[in-house]
Image: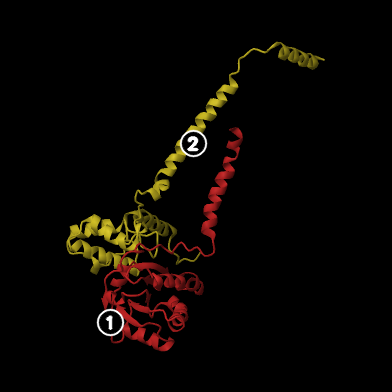
Chain colours: A red, B yellow
Amino acid sequence: MRRALYLLPLVLFLVLGGFFARSLRPDYDPHVLPSAMIDREAPQFDLAGLKDEGLARDALKGGPVLINFFASWCVPCRVEHPLLMALANREHVPLYGIDYKDQPEDAAKLLAQFGDPYRRVGLDRDGRVGLDFGVYGVPETYVLDSDGHIRKRFVGPLTAEQVDKELLPLLKALRKS
Amino acid sequence: MTGRAVPSWLAKSVFVAFLLLAPTVRLLAVEPNERLADPALEARAVAIGATLRCLVCQNESIEDSNAGLAHDIRVLLRQLLLTGDSDTQARQAIVARYGEFVLLKPPLLPATYILWFGPGALLVLGFIAVLFWLRSRRVSTSIDAPLDAQEQNRLDALLHEADR
């Protein structure tokens, strides 16, 4: 009994140390929040399009799709842009863009300059659709299944590792089901 | 020291005045055009907003933060109140979008039991530990059993040794 008591500080140290070690992991970012919308139906939206066609939620049902919130004023969006181009051109992922709180001319200029990975782009001028999705910063990327339910959210610029380890396997699984 | 410097008593009293005033001034980030015309409704909006976390600058409420997102949530909150939502409904609508984390005061859920009851439990455990410690100390100081013959012999031997 006494002996066991002497082990207490060690146990406490290990528990606390474990907690701290978890927060010190290099890939841990306390600013990345879990989405409250996972496995819920994507919010309703029907946006005017950057080009001719608009973008509406109900038109996206029927297959897993990616929705990428971006903006011309957003620097991290440019970081992930080459990856989005690769996703669209090499993997043929159905990628849709929502231009968040942006001027359409600026977005058009951006896509003309760096290439356009999106099948269609909707304009969320006042950020209301972003608010309904729970977006708290651009870029954010959502994976919707064929029923239009949100299955995953990526906060911040996508990385090649996330694409290979999480995004592509998820899309594959969703296509099968 | 140059003659044109502000007298130090003046600088000091201005500084003290600032210190005294600081706690009374609460600078809200709410912009005038966001405010609702109805003061009662606006007061409700401010009260709810003060309990909602701005997700950009995570330790500020949306009423205190001037981040773009905080502005958007303030406007949404006021729209919800205008359409007749109760305080709970309006708050719930925002939790539905951003999750429980948006609440500055964590709700009482199984996942937050440690957070809510952990400190109290530690205090109780501490009290119990102190009680045990005090009791064991009392036992060890109050041994009044007489020495047996062997112990008495040994004690005598030791005392004799000291005499020599």
> Residue B41 location, x and y as percent?
19, 59
In the displayed structure, A63 sits above or below B158; it is below
Residue visible at 32% across and 58% down in the picture: B52
Q: Residues within 10 Å of mark 2 (few under 14, many from 20)?
A: few
- Compared with B133, B56 (above or below) is below
Q: Quadrant of residue B67?
A: bottom left
> Does the CB distance between marks 1 and 2 fall below 8 Å?
no
Residue tagged 1: A54
Q: Which residue is mark 2?
A: B126
On the picture, is A175 further left or further right than B37?
Answer: right
Residue B151 found in image quarter: top right
Spot the residue most to the right: B164
- Residue B97 image offset from top left, x and y in percent: 31, 63
Res. A117 image quadrant: bottom left
Q: Amino acid at mark 1?
A: Gly
Q: Chain of mark 1?
A: A
Q: Residues within 10 Å of mark 1 (few under 14, many from 20)?
A: some
For mark 1, give the secondary structure.
Answer: loop
